Image (spheres, grey):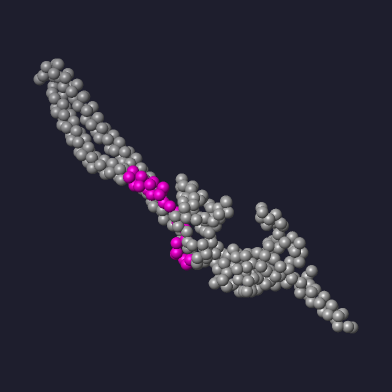
């Protein structure tokens, strides 16, 4: 066998056993905390007043995202004013009712004295007074009885009325107090702090522009994500014509586009079951594959970084 034949055999064998597939992708964080506008009653639109710098690393308790509170502050001041008025009304009513009840008691005592006086006159026998005077005494006694009963009833009705008015005022006080507390709590909720350490990632709006201070956002919109830098994987975009070569467990070499001289290694951990379109601008069909990295460099790696990768498909082709 000549040298040329031997070279061809070695080259063919090498090629067969070292087949590689090159694909692109990006780094993604497995563990992220999402920061969105808080859900506050009767408020649907929020204005961003502060955002932690995109790409910065935050620690637990550090400010991440804040929203303007002008609207809530206005409502808080209004509710505090109404609460103060209703508390003053209740205090005045409680002070005045003491005098009112004292007057009602005095009226009852007066009617009682008039009743006793009318009773004594009514008990005078007909023989000692004129007939007309006797009849008048009887009528006055009946009237005094009714006046006495009415004075007692009036005092009871007044107590019931004042009690009902106090209950109504107290209900309004409770309502406004709850509103005040609700607005105070809402103001606190407008300031969001990091629950864990990680890197700040500004999210994009429907126009694909990243959110910034002064932007208006709606309930449920993701404004910021904080990603755990110790839990990063590479998500690869496998072209349709490469899918047949990709299998779980294959070794992968990863190179960051921003640091082409730095190499990382990993293993294909999962492969999507469904092919998707890459984007509206790029209608090519791709399949997502996840690579578990052997080593994560938290100093260099950031979620969203683009990567190029070489997958060793071996003789599986």
Query: How many numbered marks, from 0 up?
Result: 0
Please, which residue is most extreme toward the front here? 4
Quadrant where the C terminus lies?
A: bottom right
Residue depicted at 16% across the width and 27% down the height: 119
Please, which residue is most extreme toward the left here? 128
The spot of residue 256 in percent (x, y) is 62, 69
The spot of residue 22 in percent (x, y) is 71, 68
Q: Is residue 297 left or right of residue 119?
A: right
Quadrant where the N terminus lies?
A: bottom right
The spot of residue 65 in percent (x, y) is 47, 58
In depth, the one of 115 and 219 nearer the eye is: 219
The span picked out in magenta is: 58-82
Q: Is residue 141 left or right of residue 268?
A: left
In depth, the one of 288 and 179 nearer the eye is: 288
In depth, the one of 85 and 212 nearer the eye is: 212
Residue depicted at 63% across the width and 71% down the height: 260
Q: Is residue 262 left or right of residue 215?
A: right
Residue depicted at 35% across the width and 47% down the height: 77
Q: Quadrant of residue 281?
A: bottom right
């Amino acid at each position: 066998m000549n040298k040329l034949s031997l070279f061809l055999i070695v080259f063919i064998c090498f090629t067969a056993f070292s087949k590689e597939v090159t694909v692109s992708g990006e780094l993604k964080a497995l563990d992220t905390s999402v920061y969105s506008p808080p859900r506050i009653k009767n408020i649907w639109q929020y204005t961003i007043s502060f955002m932690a710098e995109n790409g910065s690393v935050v620690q637990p308790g550090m400010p991440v995202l804040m929203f303007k509170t002008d609207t809530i502050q206005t409502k808080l001041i209004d509710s505090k004013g109404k609460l103060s008025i209703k508390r003053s009304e209740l205090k005045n009513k409680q002070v005045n009712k003491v005098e009112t009840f004292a007057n009602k008691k005095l009226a009852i005592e007066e009617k009682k004295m008039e009743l006793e006086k009318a009773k004594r006159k009514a008990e005078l026998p007909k023989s000692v007074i004129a007939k007309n005077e006797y009849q008048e005494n009887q009528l006055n006694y009946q009237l005094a009885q009714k006046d006495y009963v009415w004075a007692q009833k009036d005092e009871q009705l007044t107590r019931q009325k004042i009690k009902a008015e106090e209950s109504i005022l107290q209900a309004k006080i409770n309502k406004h107090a709850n509103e005040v507390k609700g607005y105070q709590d809402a103001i606190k909720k407008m300031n969001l702090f990091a629950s864990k350490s990680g890197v700040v990632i500004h999210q994009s709006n429907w126009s694909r522009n990243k959110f910034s201070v002064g932007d208006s956002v709606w309930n449920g919109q993701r404004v910021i994500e904080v990603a755990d830098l110790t839990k990063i994987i590479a998500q690869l975009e496998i072209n349709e014509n490469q899918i047949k070569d990709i299998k779980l467990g294959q070794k992968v070499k990863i190179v960051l586009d921003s640091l082409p001289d730095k190499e990382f290694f990993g293993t294909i951990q999962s492969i999507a079951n469904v092919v998707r379109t890459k984007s509206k601008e790029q209608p090519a069909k791709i399949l997502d594959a996840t690579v578990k990295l052997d080593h994560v460099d938290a100093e260099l790696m950031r979620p969203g970084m683009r990567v190029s990768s070489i997958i060793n498909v071996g003789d599986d082709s």
